[in-house]
Amino acid sequence: MQVQRLALPMLAGLVLAASALSGAARAQGAVEPVPQTSQWQTSQWQTWQWQTSTPEEQGMDSAALARLVNFGADHSLDSLLIARHGRIVLDAYYAPYTPEIPHLFNSVTKAVTGTLVAMLLRDGVLDSLDHRMVDFFGDRSIANLDDRKRAITVQTMLDMTSGMAWTEGVEGGRPDSLIEWGRSPDAIQFILDRPMAKAPGEAFDYNTGNAQLLAAIINKLTGMSARDYAVTKLFRPLGIAAPYWHSIGPGLTQGGGGLQLAPRDAARIGLLYLHDGDWGGQRLLPTGWVDRIRHAATEMHASFDSSLRYANFFWVMPQRQVVMAVGDRCQLVMLFPALDIVTVVTARDYCSFGRMADEISGAVKSDTALPVNSVGGNQLAGALRDIATEKPSTVGAVPETAAAISGKTWRFPANGFNLRALTLHLTDQPAHYELETSTPDPARPVTTLAGPIGLDGAYRLGQPTALGVMALKGTWQDNQTFAIDLRLVGGDTDRQWLLSFDGGKARLSGKDRFGRDVKADAEAPGAQ
């Protein structure tokens, strides 16, 4: 079974709507925030550079890694990075994704939020992980406040054992709490007011609200957003440029998602944990923090792997000796402490954690260098070249309908894609589009996006958004049906819309993020 729906509520629609949440606002009375880094900016803080190595030099088999690269091509991976003994042995990027585009890491973000809590503890800004959650929110009136809610601590939130009633749909089902949360005018109050289902510490229950409350606590203790605090205390020491990290309001970083990083930068965070919180002789994490994760005791009761454990926002596979930060649709930072390996995976679909871990550990043949393997090296080089080139899809013949609809604007009633209007310029050179989407921000209810569309079976990259770079391609399936493939490159989204034309009418159909069928009939078109 695949882990599902670790997304934040603002990712639930077309996903493009989240671009309205792109600003990182300043907390009242806080220091000036660190500017968001451009999606294409090169790091200005790098002081330590990754070194590369052949797999054999680090005791790994090139042929096995070539098979793993090919496996990734069949399972919607965007990138796959493996570093052993502090050196990168595999750095694979699947076109049209490239290393210059930061990737959205979804709930891997929770592990970063937990890391910031650890730093507060190290510096004495947070006195104890047993500090009660309600003590930080004395300025608010909290509903359903009973002895169980008063007993919630920082540690129970880090372990997802806070006991709050919450439905996130991690193993399927409707993510009701995420949907309700996304509609709430006050994200923090919504979480604080949840009724209690269990006593804190009693049982694991995946709840993104825990991470969001901790991000709010970071803001209260430091006067900075979690993102700005991370830039100062974590990212700069690791040599990571100030990244894009979504906010949900003034001074409030998304604690459970929304962080964009380059895979090599995500691997730096993994390397910090692999080295027990030490970075070049500087102790960034308190003693015992990483050890508690490696010996995680909270049972997750996951149907797809009953052995999974949890601690401090990390997942642990004890039998495989693997520690993971996990994000929706197979965003992974995997640590193999016994093998001295850090792996970073970015993807657009769910994956088997066990299969991934077994393939990686299976490529290890020795703790010392292996003989040169020219055959395996050639296989790996060929696999890397192959995935770096996009494979165009089949393109249908262009019917007369293309000219008839080109330049016309089709407007749609409310729908599961949040699409309000679409204009296709299919006879222009180059072909391009404009679209309008609804957003959850009342101050900015509509977002307009425009860009090129590939008609030769390959994506054309357009505008960077808060959730990836827009890329579209289109093809005629028959004389009346135009298929639009939309991908947020550096995000986790693949969509296909079908536009069917009949007698001056148009119908939009496809599936939303949760696999539900969506159909919407357009109003009468008008020329641009």
Image: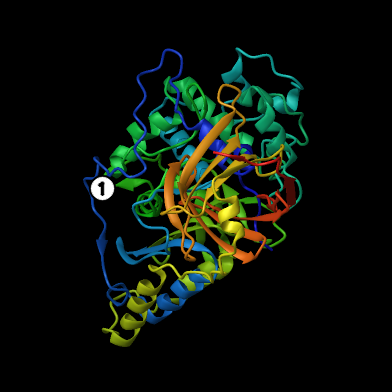
Q: Nearer the viewer, residue 200 or 348?
A: 348
Residue 338 placement, left or right of 348: left
Q: How is the model colour-coded? A: rainbow
Secondary element at image label 1: loop
Q: Residue at x 67, y 28 (%)?
A: 191
State the image quarter where residue 226 is shown. Answer: top left
- What is the crowding at mark 1: few (fewer than 14 residues within 10 Å), some, or many (at least 20)? few
Rendered-image quadrant of the N terminus = bottom right
Quadrant into which the C terminus falls: top right
How far from the left and from the top, in percent, is residue 299? 66, 52
Q: On the picture, is 230 further left or further right than 528? A: left
Work out which residue is located at the far left of the displayed protein and give it.
47
Q: Is residue 467 visible?
A: yes
Whether residue 61 is visible: no
Residue 232: which quarter of the image?
A: top left
Image position of 282 with respect to 375: above or below: above
Percent x, y of residue 487: 52, 54
Question: How far across and how far down the image is residue 157, in percent?
Answer: 61, 36
Q: Which amino acid type is marked by label 1?
A: Gly
Image location of residue 155, percent across then percent down = 57, 36
Q: Quadrant of residue 164?
A: top right
Q: Nearer the viewer, residue 245 or 448?
A: 448
- Report how many numbered discs are placed on residues in the image: 1
Task: Tell me the residue that label 1 is attached to.
Answer: 280
Residue 362 to residue 143: above or below? below
> Of residues 142 and 483, which is closer to you in this image?
483
